[in-house]
Amino acid sequence: MNKILYALLSVVVLSSCANSYNIEGTSNLSTLDGQKLYLKVFANDDMKSVDSCDVVHGKFTFCGPLDSVKWANIYMDQNLLIPVVLESGDIVIRIDNTQEVISGTPLNEKLNTFLRSYTQFQNQYNELARGNSQMIMNGLSEDEANSRSNVRLGQLVQKADKQFTTFISDNYDNAVGPCAFMLLTIGNQYPTMDVWMEDLLSKASNAFKNDGYVKFYCNEAKRFQDMMNGMAPQPATNESQPDFSNGATAAPMTPNEMAGDTASNK
C-alpha cells in the first residue's frame, strides 16, 4: 500500500512540475537590488501582473502554475526589463551592464537568439548615427553626411528586414514570434502599420494573428489610421488611449521606420 501511495504522489508531483514555470534570475546592477519586479502577461488589451518578487542580493525568482505556453514581460515599476516565455522547465535570466541573457528552456533559447540579433542591430544603428554626427563635426556638409550615412543605413535595414522577417516567420506558431513582434512595436507612442508589418502579417498563420497583443495592435493601428484619414471620430480629450510605449525605456523601430529616418535626426 505504501508503495502505491508513493507512486501516486510521485505522479502528482511530476504532473505539477510539468504544468508550472520557474524563473531564476541574477543581476549585478545595483539599481535593481531591493526593487520589486513584476511578471506581466497580455490579457484584456493590457499587460496584467501575474506574479511579483523582490530582488535580494542580486537574485530574484518567479514561479507559478502554467495553463499554456505564453510570452510575458518582466517590469521594474513601469520599465520593461526583459521579455520571457513562460513554459515548463527551469528558466535562467541574467541581467548585467552589457547584456540580458535568457536560457534554460527551448523557446527561451530562441528568444535569446532574437534579443542578441536585435541588440546588435540597435548598436549598429546607433554607431551609424554617431558616425553621421562625427562627419558633420569634421566639416562635411549635412547633406553629404546624410547621403553617405543613408547608403549604409539602407544596407543595414535590408539585412535586418530579412533577418527579423525570417525569425518571426519561423516562429509564427509558438510564443516567440508574437513576443518578437511585441518587442518591435511596444515602444511606439501610436500604433502604426508600415509596409514591413503588412508583409509580415499577410503571410502569418492564424495562431500568430490571433495572439492577444498582435490582434490588439493591428486593430488599434487600423483605428488610428482611420482616425488620421478622418474616417473615425477623434477621441474625447478625457478618453484614455492605449500607450504602446508601456514604460519601455526606448522606442524600438521596425526596419521600415528606420529606413524612413535620416541619420541626421539621431
Image: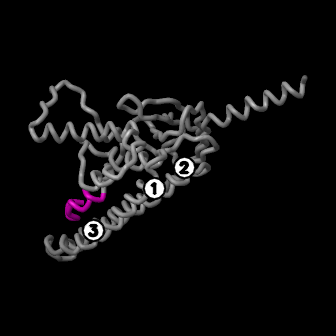
Residue under label 2? 108
Rendered residue at 64%/43% (across/down):
89
Residue 37: x %, y % from top left: 50, 36
Instruction: For the C terminus, give its image quadrant.
Output: bottom left
Image mark for residue 153: 3
Real-space Cα separation, disc 2 to disc 1, in angstroms: 15 Å
Q: Earlier in the sequence, mark 3 or mark 1?
A: 3
Amino acid type shown at disc 1: Asp
From the image, state whether disc 2 or disc 1 is nearer to you.
1
Q: Earlier in the sequence, mark 2 or mark 1?
A: 2
- Visible residue check, residue 28: no
Image mark for residue 170: 1
Dot 3: what SS? Answer: helix
In depth, the one of 227 and 263 nearer the eye is 227
Residue interval drawn in magenta = 255-266
Q: Earlier in the sequence, mark 3 or mark 2?
A: 2
From the image, state whether disc 3 or disc 2 is nearer to you.
2
